[in-house]
Amino acid sequence: MNRHALTLTFLASLTFAGTASAQTSLTLPAAVSRALSSNADVVSARATLQKAQANLRAVRADPSSIITTSTQAEQDVGAQAATLDGTKLKTMQAVVSAYLSAYETGQRVALNAAQVALDERNLAIARARLAARVATQLDVNRAQTSLNANRQELADARAQLPVQEAQLARLLGLNAGTDLKLGAPPAAPKLSTTLAALQAGLDKRLPALVQAANGVAFARLQVSIADNDYTPVRTLEDARTALANAGRGLEDAARASGTGVRDAYRAVQSAQEGLNVAREQAQNAQASLTLARARLKAGTAAPVEVQQAEVQAQQAALAVQQAQGGVWQALAALSVASGLDVTGLVQ
C-alpha cells in the first residue's frame, strides 16, 4: 500500500472514530437528569438562589440590619428556592416533550417505511391484475396515489427527525449535530397522589404564589410597624389598604392555580384511559397478525395479507407509544401546575 493510500485510510479511521464518539445513547430519565444539571435556565436559577442565600447571611451578620431588610432577604431566599424548583419542573416538562417527539418520529419513520413497502407491493399487484384484465386502470391509479402519499409522509418524518433531535440536544446542553440514540421511554408511573394533596400548599411551592404570599406577609409587617402612636394615621391606613389588596391578589392567584391543578389532574386520568384503549387495540391487531400468519401457513391467505397485518400491528404499537407519551406529558404538566413532581424524573 502506498503512502497516499495509508494517509487516506488513517484519515478515514479518524473520521469514523469521531463520528462514533459523537453518538450519545440516552434514556428518558437520563435525559432529564442531564438537563437538570446542565440546562442554562436551571444553572441560572441555582446561581440566583445562591446569591440570595449569600445576601441573607450577610444581612444576618450585620448588626445594623433592620427588620424590613432581613425580612426581604429571607423572603427572597424562599422565592428563589421556589423558582429553582419550578424551573426544574419546567425543564423536565420540556425535555419530556422533546424526547417523546424525537423518539416517536423515529418510530414513525420505521412505520412509514413499512407502509411504503406495502404500497409498492400493492401497486405491483394492481399492475399485474390490470395486465390480467381483472382490475382497472383506476385500481392502479389508486395504488399509485397511496404510494405517493406515504412516500411523502416518510420524507416528512425523516426531515423532522434531525430538527427534533437538535432541539432535544440543545435542552441537554449537547453540541449541535450530536448523534442521539434514544431508548424506548419507560412505562409512565400511575398517578397515586390525590387531587386534594396536590392542591394543598400551593402558596409554598409555586413561584408566583410564593411571591404573592411574601407580598401579603410583608404588607402585614408594614401594618404592624405603622400601628403605633408615633406614626401618622394615614401611613397606617395606606398599609392596611396595601395588605387588603395583597390578600385579594393572593386569593385570586391561589384560586386560579387550584383550578389549573384540577384540570391537569383530569388530563392525566384521561390520558391513562386513552392508553388502556390503545393497548386493547394493539392486542387486537396482534391477534389479527397471528391469524393472518396461520392462514398463510394453511394456504388460505396471500403473503400481502400478512404484510398488511404486520403494518397494522406496527401502527397499533405506535399508537400505544403515543398514548404512553400522552401520559408522560400529562404527568409533566401536572407536576408544573402543582409544584410537585409526579413523574419520578426530578431528583
Image (tube, rainbow, N blue to C red):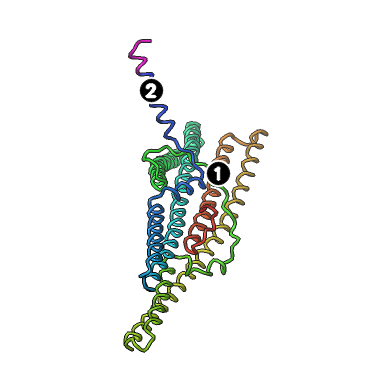
Work out which quarter of the rendered image holds the N terminus and state it: top left
Q: Which residue is mark 2?
A: 12
Which element carries disc 1, helix, strand or loop?
helix
In this view, 107 is above or below 235: above
Would you say residue 141 is visible in this rendering?
no
Q: Which mark is first along the chain, 2 or 1?
A: 2
- Give the class, few, some or many, for how many residues have Cα within 10 Å of label 2's Cα (few <14, many ≥20): few
Chief SS of the magenta region? helix
Q: Nearer the viewer, residue 244 or 171?
A: 244
Residue 195: say if magenta.
no
**In the rendered structure, which amino acid carries the disc numbered 1?**
Gln
**In the image, is residue 332 above or below residue 288?**
below
* Magenta highlight range: 1-7
Image depth: mark 1 or mark 2 in front: 2
Distance from Cα at disc 1 to Cα at disc 2: 42 Å
Q: Is residue 306 visible?
A: yes
Residue that lies at the very extreme toward the front in this rendered image: 63
* In-image side of 282 versus 256 (left or right): right
Give whichever of 36, 149 is nearer the camera.
36
Q: Are the residues tagged 1 and 2 within 8 Å (C-beta)?
A: no
Mark 2 secondary-structure assignment: helix
Task: Find residue 29 and report its horizontal and vertical position in percent.
Answer: 52, 47
Percent across and percent down for residue 79 are 42, 65
Q: Amino acid at mark 2?
A: Ala
Q: Residue at x 32, y 87 (%)?
A: 232
Image position of 212 with respect to 83: above or below = below
Q: Position of residue 191 (x, y in %)?
A: 58, 59
Q: Which residue is mark 1?
A: 312
- Position of residue 197 relative to residue 275, above or below, is below
Q: Residue 49 at x, y = what percent? A: 40, 59
Image point 62% across, 44% down: which residue? Answer: 286
